[in-house]
């Protein structure tokens, strides 16, 4: 079987399982869409063990930087003085600069993965109006929910690559999914 057909089967079946898991047993506590972002990130980061590590560390770093950025933007009081749009823009600029500087450390060099983690954390925070939960040690904290969702998504990417390789008769599948 071709690798593309094997990937279609692997990704389709595992995508259905992931969706059932996130919407069923996990009760909607995590974000399936963030898992799929990380799943794609795994493949565009080269797949295999290196893509798995790069995706997990990069998306988690981006999520943490987003959490810090959001906290400062909302709790420093400078938004009241400077105006929310100006202060939020300054905070995001500093957060983005921090991500790029963090990329100087080789295990955090995947800047796109950091951006995905940052963007997903901000999105979940804004969509759920949960900025007040950013310091909680619970799944209500969007930072924690995104990190866990993206770890699961990256692992699903890794498993889907392995399954596709087995279906295609290869030892290690690597493709542009």
Image (cartoon, grey):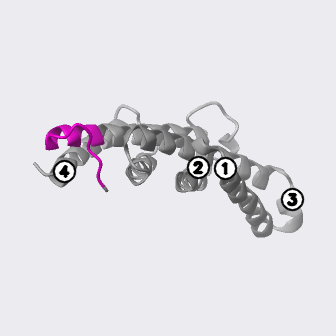
Q: Residue at 41% of width from left, 47% of height from top?
A: 42
* Secondary structure state at the residue bearing disc 3: helix
- Real-space CA distance between mark 1 and mark 4, rounded to the nearest whole angstrom: 35 Å
Q: Which residue is mark 4?
A: 3
> Residues at badges 1 and 2 in contact (C-beta under 8 Å)?
yes
* Residue 52, percent from left and from top: 44, 40
x and y percentages locating residue 15 in the rendered image: 28, 45
Q: Which element is circle 2 on?
A: loop
Q: Nearer the viewer, mark 3 or mark 4?
A: 4
Image vertical order of residue 173 relative to residue 94, above or below = above
In the rendered image, residue 141 lying in the magenta stretch gets the answer no
Q: Which mark is residue 78?
A: 3
User: What residue is disc 2 on?
Assistant: 109
Disc number placed over residue 104 in the picture, else none:
1
Q: Nearer the viewer, mark 1 or mark 4?
A: 1
Question: Element at badge 4?
Answer: helix
Q: Earlier in the sequence, mark 1 or mark 4?
A: 4
| Gap in angstroms between the C-alphas marked 3 and 2 | 31 Å
Pointer 1 and pointer 4: residues touching (CB < 8 Å)?
no
């Amino acid at each position: 079987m071709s690798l593309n057909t094997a990937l279609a089967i692997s990704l389709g079946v595992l995508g259905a399982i992931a969706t059932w898991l996130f919407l069923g047993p996990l009760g909607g506590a995590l974000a399936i869409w963030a898992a799929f972002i990380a799943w794609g990130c795994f493949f565009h980061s080269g797949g295999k063990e290196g893509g798995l590590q790069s995706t997990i560390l990069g998306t988690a770093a981006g999520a943490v930087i987003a959490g810090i950025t959001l906290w400062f933007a909302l709790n420093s009081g400078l938004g009241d003085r400077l105006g929310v749009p100006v202060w939020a823009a300054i905070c995001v600029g500093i957060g983005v600069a921090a991500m790029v500087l963090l990329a100087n450390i080789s295990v955090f060099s995947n800047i796109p993965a950091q951006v995905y983690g940052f963007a997903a954390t901000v999105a979940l925070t804004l969509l759920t109006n949960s900025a007040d939960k950013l310091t909680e040690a619970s799944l209500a904290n969007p930072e924690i929910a995104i990190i866990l969702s993206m770890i699961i998504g990256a692992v699903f990417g890794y498993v889907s690559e392995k399954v596709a390789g087995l279906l295609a008769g290869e030892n290690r599948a690597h493709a542009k999914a």
